[in-house]
Image (tube, grey):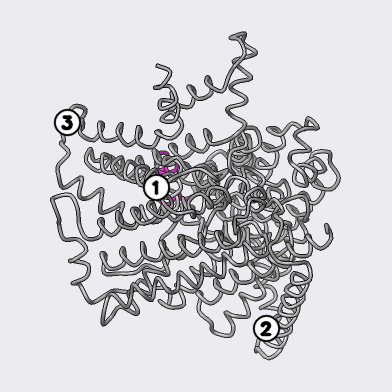
């Protein structure tokens, strides 16, 4: 892992034929797993009820919003930010505090703060070539420390009920779900239709070439992480509203869930390939499996373990397929 | 003068960790001069105790970084190692440690095999591994902390030896010594750095890169498992999720210890110096009774500084700025000096 080119393609130690066999075996495994999930779903009482499907879509919300940011980062070739979950919690705390200025003002201020938090990290990563993983681990420690300095670490409670409309449901789905769809649409538009988005794909595809071609690496880094920070801030706003208060505990497993959704969505670890809406599919797949395991009475540990194994499998499949097209 | 210069240059390149350790020791001894407290023998003992587990984790993370990879699953293995030690060590603590080490060997071999044979970047693989291992730990423990009813191993591990040491810290130092000896006196050390520095060239030169990589990931997993087992026995409990703080410590210690994220650089002794310096620094915070969040903030800030200086382009940019300001052509020496000033 040299510097920022985290997923630089390495010459593999096994032959192409062997790789093809491994790929085939894994794809058969994934297909089998999919069949098991479908059979499991069919035989599980209550899985196909409207209520359960609503629950699955509702649970995708927070992770989906953060995962949009994670996807943009991964496409840019900076692999991941390990601080997005913490940023969501920090901006949730900020949002709840800022509610005293009015809801609309609080929302705008929170998104601005989130964008800045991300952009600062992205500037160091894009401009200096700082290692994204370690820098964002450090950012978590610094952000957590700063939160305690400013809010003494307790739970921030909202001053009034002006925000509760964010908790309402429309046709049985929480507002968060629709916000997520909006964020996904924005992400997809920015990545596909704007110059910034296209530059991001190019930087992710070949960082050295982009650097040599005079791409403004610092600006793109700041833009990518700023965008991710904004997404995390939106998630933070919804989290703060949903929990009617905010503390650092909101971080939970948000960061890793968002990474899992991005990887399961098929984003290429090395960057340059992937898309925001596929990440949404990844998030829904994970949420469906988790829901199924839950209905079947498996413990939380099993759910987490399955998620981890799924991530490894998909990473290998995506990697081998991308190598296949290159060779 | 001509003869001293190469030695000095080598020290400027590799002596950083020891300079940092020296500076922290001075700050440690000088505590009475800037606070009303004094550093006691017990504080030294305490710092060595806390570095016993975290230092091993730093060694694991550092080794993977020397190989040009990054093993995120170490913290997961740290949790699983502790849990297995407590579960299987009911009758004999040794069996618990052996179980933890065996699990580490198997998991390290699987991860290392995937990374080496398929040529995938280690970060996503070990990230999935980290999530899966935390899940597995939680499955074994039902998501709760598990108490270890046999207190005698914990008491033995904490026993004072020569005022400052304990069996636990001696085990840690022993592990560092073994790794250092292997890296210094055998081909493995050279091969490891070659694999981390330039993998293609290493392979062309005849290094069995995949063996080195699999071996590295087996070592990192086993060392992390040992660290977790020692911690669990000492606390007489195993926690299902250690949180993010151990990783912050481990990465900071490894980077302070002269390991670079680009790979190919670093020694076990350097990592030891970095880890001990960091834990002495934390102990200073304990002595002068700074609130936890301040010391966390300082640690995080320290990691930001260290990783920024590890970044390849920052140095180039500083050189460019100096050149533009008309201070003559900047050389690598200026950048070296800048780096040292910061330390």
The image position of residue A309, as x and y in percent, is 60, 71
Residue A251 in the image: state x and y as whole percent: 51, 55
From the viewer's side, name the closer residue of A223 and A321. A321
* Image position of B231 (left or right of B10): left
Does the rendering let one see residue A39? yes
Q: Secondary structure at mark 3?
A: helix
Location of residue A180 with respect to B194 vertically, above or below = below
Chain containing the residue with disc 1: A
Q: Tell if the residue under mark 3 belongs to the same chain as the one under mark 1.
A: no
Residue at image x 23%, y 35%? Answer: B28
Residue on which the image places disc 3: B32
Start and end of the magenta stretch?
A145-157
* Residue bearing mark 1: A153
Q: Earlier in the sequence, mark 2 or mark 1?
A: 2
Look at the numbered disc 1 and give the secondary structure of its residue: loop
Q: Is residue A157 left or right of residue A236?
A: left
Closer-to-camera residue (B62/B240): B62
Mark 2 = which residue? A47
Determine crowd level at label 3: few under 14, some 14-19, many 20+ residues with C-alpha closer than 10 A: few
């Amino acid at each position: 892992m040299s510097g920022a080119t985290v997923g630089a393609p390495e010459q593999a130690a096994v032959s192409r034929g062997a790789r093809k066999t491994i790929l085939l075996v894994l794809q058969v495994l994934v297909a089998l797993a999919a069949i098991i999930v479908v059979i499991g779903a069919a035989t599980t009482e209550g899985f196909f009820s409207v209520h359960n499907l609503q629950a699955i879509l509702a649970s995708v919300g927070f992770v989906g919003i953060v995962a949009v940011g994670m996807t943009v980062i991964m496409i840019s070739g900076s692999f991941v930010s390990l601080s997005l979950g913490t940023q969501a919690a920090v901006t949730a705390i900020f949002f709840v505090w800022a509610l005293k200025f009015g809801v609309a003002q609080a929302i705008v201020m929170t998104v601005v703060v989130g964008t800045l938090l991300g952009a600062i990290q992205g500037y160091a990563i894009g401009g200096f070539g700082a290692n994204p993983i370690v820098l964002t681990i450090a950012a978590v420690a610094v952000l957590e420390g700063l939160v305690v300095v400013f809010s003494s670490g307790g739970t921030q409670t909202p001053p009034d009920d002006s925000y509760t409309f964010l908790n309402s449901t429309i046709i049985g789905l929480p507002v968060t779900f629709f916000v997520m769809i909006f964020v996904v649409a924005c992400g997809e538009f920015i990545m596909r239709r704007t110059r910034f988005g296209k530059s991001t794909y190019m930087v992710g595809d070949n960082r050295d070439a982009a650097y040599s071609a005079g791409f403004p690496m610092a600006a793109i880094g700041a833009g990518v992480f700023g965008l991710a920070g904004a997404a995390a801030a939106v998630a933070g706003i919804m989290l703060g509203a949903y929990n009617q208060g905010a503390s650092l505990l909101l971080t939970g497993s948000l960061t890793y869930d968002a990474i899992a959704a991005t990887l399961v969505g098929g984003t290429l670890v090395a960057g340059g390939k992937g898309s925001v809406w596929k990440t949404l599919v990844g998030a829904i797949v994970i949420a469906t499996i988790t829901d199924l395991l839950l209905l079947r009475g498996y413990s939380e540990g099993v759910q987490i373990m399955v998620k981890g194994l799924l991530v490894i499998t998909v990473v290998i499949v995506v990697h081998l397929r991308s190598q296949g097209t290159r060779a | 003068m001509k003869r001293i210069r190469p030695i000095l240059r080598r020290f400027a390149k590799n002596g950083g960790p020891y300079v940092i350790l020296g500076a922290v020791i001075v700050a440690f001894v000088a505590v009475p001069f800037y606070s009303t407290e004094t550093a006691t023998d017990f504080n030294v003992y305490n710092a060595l105790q806390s570095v016993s587990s975290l230092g091993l984790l730093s060694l694991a993370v550092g080794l993977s970084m020397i190989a040009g990879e990054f093993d995120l699953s170490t913290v997961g293995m740290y949790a699983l190692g502790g849990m297995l030690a407590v579960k299987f060590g009911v009758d004999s603590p040794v069996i618990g440690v052996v179980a933890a080490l065996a699990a580490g060997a198997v998991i390290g071999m699987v991860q290392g095999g995937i990374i080496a044979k398929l040529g995938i970047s280690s970060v996503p693989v070990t990230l999935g591994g980290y999530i899966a291992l935390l899940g597995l730990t939680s499955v074994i423990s039902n998501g709760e902390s598990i108490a270890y009813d046999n207190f005698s191993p914990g008491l033995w591990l904490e026993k004072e030896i020569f005022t400052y040491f304990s069996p636990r810290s001696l085990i840690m130092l022993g592990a560092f010594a073994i790794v250092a000896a292997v890296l210094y006196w055998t081909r493995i050390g050279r091969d490891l750095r070659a694999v981390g520095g330039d993998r293609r060239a290493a392979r062309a030169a005849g290094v069995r890169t995949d063996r080195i990589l699999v071996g590295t990931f087996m070592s990192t997993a086993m060392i992390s498992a040992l660290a977790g087992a020692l911690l669990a026995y000492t606390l007489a409990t195993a926690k299902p999720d250690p949180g993010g703080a151990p990783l912050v410590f481990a990465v900071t210690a490894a980077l302070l210890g002269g390991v670079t994220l680009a790979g190919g650089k670093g020694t076990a002794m350097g990592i030891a110096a970095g880890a001990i310096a960091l834990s002495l620094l934390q102990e200073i915070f304990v002595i002068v009774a700074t609130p936890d969040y301040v010391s966390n903030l300082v640690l995080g800030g320290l990691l930001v500084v260290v990783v920024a200086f590890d970044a390849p382009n920052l140095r180039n940019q500083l050189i460019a700025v100096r050149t533009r300001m008309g201070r003559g052509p900047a050389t690598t020496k200026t950048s070296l000096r800048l780096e040292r000033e910061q330390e």
